[in-house]
Amino acid sequence: MERIEFYKDRTLSERFSASIDFLKQNWKVLYKNVLIGALPLAIIGGYFSQYYMKASFAGLYSGGTLANPLYILIYFLAAINLGIYLSAMPGAILKRYDEGKLTPSTSWGDLSGAMFSLSGKTFALGLIITVVIVIFAAAFVVVFSFLADGSKGGAFFAGLLAVVVLIPVLFAFLPSLALTFYPAYFSQASIWESIKIAFGMGFRNWGSLIVTLLLAGIAMYIIMIIFSIPNIIAVFISPGEVTFLTFIAAFITMLGNILTYPIMFIFIAFQYFSIVEKEQGVSLQSKVSEFENL
């Protein structure tokens, strides 16, 4: 098959097309390596998610029995590690493809070094973004709690104002947040530089990125909802219970995330590559360097 060039200035439709072509070429090697690490984490997360649901229902209904906090901690650790892995492994595969070394026989061992390196970057970036969001959310709650003033009218006004403020803020920063990992992954940027570059690119290319995120996000969300149906049914039949049925249902939900997230990651990666080429001319600089070395 014809090799797909990453750093190429493409239109929005061409970016989608290039992403789909890449997936058509490499879906076997992609999922072969993604599933090796993701399935064990999904099994652990699926099993212990039942205890998280049990704790949630115990909080809703009086007389409920609280789950072991250790089980809930294990669930969150499995979910966090799964999220990191589902970014790092597709990132490692893209890097190997860009180096011209990706083949159908590429194994987990071939990718593990790059994957662990990217996992560290993912964790650091995710931690920083999470801390910033938590601080912002805490300040937000304090301000709007003050506006609520303990009255029904104040609470309604504060809630309405929160919706009016939160939705524009979410849409304004969503493209930048979506690009956060990519400069660190593919441009050798430091953690803080990656955040700075991502936010600059996100605001400069907000229109095309938000369209991509909405279109691809809606498609992925529909697929994830389909995979979540068994879990919804299981929770409805046996709320707060831990059974083999609830484990299988929770595992299927996590399997939906495993299958859809790498696709979303690759779609956004091609947005990043196109923006970098448009703004920095990476491929042109590379060709000039090759000519000078002749």
Image: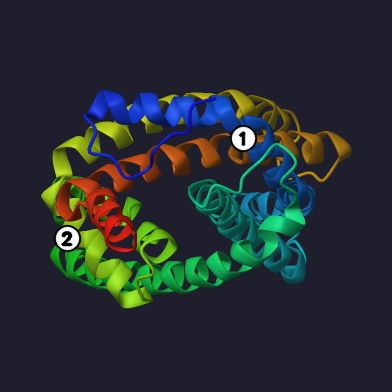
Q: Which residue is mark 1?
A: 259
Q: Quadrant of residue 255?
A: top right
- Does residue 63 show up? no
Q: Quadrant of the C terminus?
A: bottom left
Q: Which residue is mark 2?
A: 200
> In percent of the image, x 36 and y 63: which residue is there?
187
Type of the residue with mark 1: Leu
- 3D distance between C-alphas at marks 1 and 2: 30 Å
Asked if 230 appears above or below 168 in the picture, the reply is: above
Q: Quadrant of residue 9?
A: top left
> In percent of the image, x 31 and y 74: which residue is there?
135
Front one among 234 and 41: 41
Give the structural element (helix, strand or loop) at label 2. Answer: helix
Q: Nearer the viewer, mark 1 or mark 2?
A: 2
- Residue 93 appears at what percent x and percent y? 58, 49
- Residue 259 appears at what percent x and percent y? 61, 35
- Does residue 255 show up? yes
Front one among 280 and 210: 280
